[in-house]
Structures are given as C-alpha cells and as structure tokens.
C-alpha cells in the first residue's frame, strides 16, 4: 500500500512539474510576443489561469502528503504521547469533515459550471472546480490513512 501511495505521489509531482512548465512557457511566450512583436496569443491567459488553479490544489495535496503545511504545536507538544495521538485523531476527523465540505461544494459548482464555456478557449469553466474536488478527495484519503495508522498505534499500546 505504501508503494502505491509513493507511486501516486510521484505521478502527482510529475503532473505538477508539467503544469508549472507549460504555464511558465505559455506566459513567457505571451510576454515576448506582447512586448517584442506587439501581438499576443489570447488563449494563453485563460489556459494559464486554469493551470494555476490546478497547480495550487495539486500542490496542496503534495504539501499535505509530506506534512509540510503550517501547524501550530504549542499545545500538543506539552501533552503526553497518548493524549497527543488522541488529539490528532480528533483534529484529523475535523479536517476530514472539512474535506467533505470542500468536495461536496466544489462538486456542486462543477456540475453548475460544466456547461459554461470560457469566452476565448471554449473550455468548460467547471474544470476549475474539478481541481478542488479531486484535491479534497485525495487529501481525505490521506487523512483516513493517517487516522487508521494512529488508531492502530494506539491499539498496539505504543506511545511514540
């Protein structure tokens, strides 16, 4: 299971690199065309905007998977190890509920906006909301795995 999670992480990292590279090339090309040749490719602005939304949400998934988000640990550092693990289960369940809210709301927005087309590219506007749906599901899966691991550690009686 861990190797599957690592494979998914590597695929996400590659996808983020591809998105960032393509977005950088499109924006750079548009800047060169605009200032060098007094013309531009209009579609690059919309496409790079869509890419930026996907980049932000997939980057959030990657940051969460590597535990690189900001966390305040002033209270939890003072707790004994068992209480710390119990508190982490409660906070993970609260985050799981937030993931549910994100997925539910963004799925509704995706369905409402899938038929609204972007004015220049003609792509469905719902694509941007699909990014938050996928990110919410992936982060929710990571949280569930962390809760299961924490509960199994508590059930074995390990404190660290």
Image (cartoon, grey):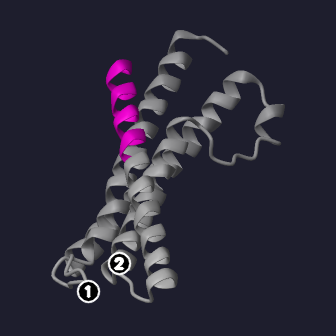
Q: Provide residue 43's location: percent of width, then percent of height.
A: 31, 79
For residue 103, say whether it is visible. Answer: no
Indicate left or right for 122 with 26 as reference: left
43 part of magenta stretch: no
* Residue 139 drawn above or below residue 24: above
Quarter the C terminus occupies: top right
Asked whether 136 or 144 is in front, the reply is 136
Secondary structure character of the magenta stretch overall = helix
Q: Residue furthest left?
A: 115
- Which residue appears at 53% of the width and 25% of the height? 150
Q: Provide residue 74's location: percent of width, then percent of height.
A: 83, 42
Question: What label does residue 73 carry, if any?
Answer: none
Q: Residues within 10 Å of mark 1 (few under 14, many from 20)?
A: few
Q: Provide residue 17's location: percent of width, then percent of height.
A: 43, 46
Badge 1 marks a residue whose secondary structure is: loop
Query: Contact, CB < 8 Å: mark 2 with mark 1?
Result: yes
Q: Provide residue 124's location: percent of width, then percent of height.
A: 21, 76
Asked whether 84 or 121 is in front, the reply is 121
Q: Which residue position holds label 2?
A: 46
Q: Which residue position holds label 1?
A: 120
Asked whether 126 or 17 is in front, the reply is 17
For the record, the magenta segment spans 1-15
The quarter of the picture where residue 63 lies is: top right
For residue 120, say whether it is visible. Answer: yes
- Which residue appears at 61% of the width and 36% of the height? 88
Spatial distance from mark 2 to mark 1, Cα to Cα?
A: 7 Å
Indicate left or right for 109 with 82 as reference: left
Q: Earlier in the sequence, mark 2 or mark 1?
A: 2
* Residue 86 drawn above or below residue 132: above
- Which residue appears at 39% of the width and 87% of the height? 39
Q: Residues within 10 Å of mark 2 (few under 14, many from 20)?
A: some
Badge 2 marks a residue whose secondary structure is: helix
């Amino acid at each position: 299971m861990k190797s599957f999670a690592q494979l998914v992480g590597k695929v996400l990292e590659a996808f983020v690199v591809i998105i960032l590279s393509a977005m950088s090339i499109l924006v750079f090309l548009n800047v060169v065309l605009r200032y060098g040749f007094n013309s531009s490719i209009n579609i690059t602005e919309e496409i790079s905007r869509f890419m930026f939304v996907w980049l932000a949400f997939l980057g959030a998934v990657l940051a969460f998977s590597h535990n690189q988000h900001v966390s305040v640990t002033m209270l939890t550092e003072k707790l004994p190890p068992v209480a710390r693990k119990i508190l982490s289960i409660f906070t993970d369940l609260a985050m799981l509920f937030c993931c549910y809210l994100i997925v539910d709301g963004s799925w509704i927005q995706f369905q409402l906006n899938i038929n609204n087309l972007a004015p220049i590219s003609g792509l469905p506007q719902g694509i941007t909301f699909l990014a938050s749906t996928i990110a919410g599901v992936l982060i929710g899966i990571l949280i569930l795995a962390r809760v299961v691991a924490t509960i199994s550690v508590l059930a074995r009686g390990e404190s660290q």
